[in-house]
Image (cartoon, rainbow, N blue to C red):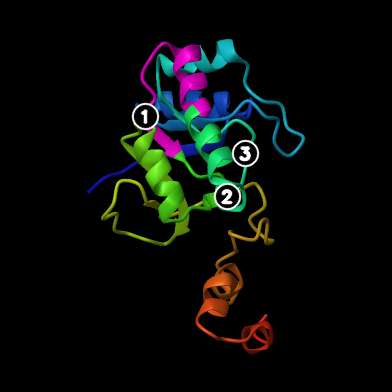
Amino acid sequence: MLFTTSWDDGYKLDLRLADLLDQYDIKGTFYVCPRKQHDKDMMTNDEIALLRERHEIGAHTLRHSKLTEVSSVEAKEEIESSKQWVEQITGAPCKMFCYPYGFHNDEVIQLVRNAGFSGARTTERLQFTANDPFTMPTTLQVTPFPKRKTWSRWWHPLDPYGPLRVRKRELKKLGIKKRRYKRLA
């Protein structure tokens, strides 16, 4: 069984998480990108480099782009440039990638493979198998807003229809009309 702990975006508060992990001798992967996210303070390049001495640093694109919604050329640039950025800051190989918002498809996965990563994490929740290192799921997500829905790919356990709303594109491809699952919300 593989146990990992990972943290996305590179918020300055992640440094406190790293200290807590250190107290219990737990290693984490911190996926960072230089773009400010959600009006929160981000770690500096020096803080990222120091964090790399204790934990793994993974790439998370430069602008936190939804890779399935940009051109292939832009997705490739985001993936490859973020790997180079992390390696330049840390002086170490960047082996892991995390898809922003969890958005990925076969083309994006191939771009991540071609960039030289060893694996990538998704935001697929409550999955307990990882057959492909480029679609490693998340079995538990902890957010600072436990009592309300936060983003479209994440939902609260008391919201049983969240997965249907998250999968609306896939449902549409299967011919299932929106009104059928919208009523469930």
Which residue is identified by label 2?
A: 101
Q: Residues within 10 Å of mark 3 (few under 14, many from 20)?
A: some
Label 3 to label 1, Cα distance in Å?
A: 24 Å
The quarter of the displayed image where residue 39 is located? top right
Would residue 160 appear left or right of 87 to someone viewing this image? right
C-beta proximity under 8 Å, tags 2 and 3: yes
List x then y, in percent, for residue 178.
Answer: 65, 83
The magenta-colored residue range is: 81-97
List x then y, in percent, for residue 66.
Answer: 60, 48
- Quadrant containing the C terminus is bottom right
Q: Is residue 60 at all visible to an observer of this figure?
A: no
- Asked if 105 appears above or below 26 in the picture, the reply is below
Which residue is identified by label 3?
A: 64
Q: Residue at x 66, y 25 (%)?
A: 42
- Asked if 108 appears above or below 32 in the picture, the reply is below
List x then y, in percent, for residue 90.
Answer: 45, 14
Which residue is identified by label 1?
A: 27
Q: Residue at x 53, y 45 (%)?
A: 72
**Among numbered discs 2 and 3, the one appearing first in the sequence:** 3
Of residues 4 and 85, the one nearer the viewer is 85
Kind of residue indicated by mark 2? Tyr
**Among numbered discs 3 and 1, the one appearing first in the sequence:** 1
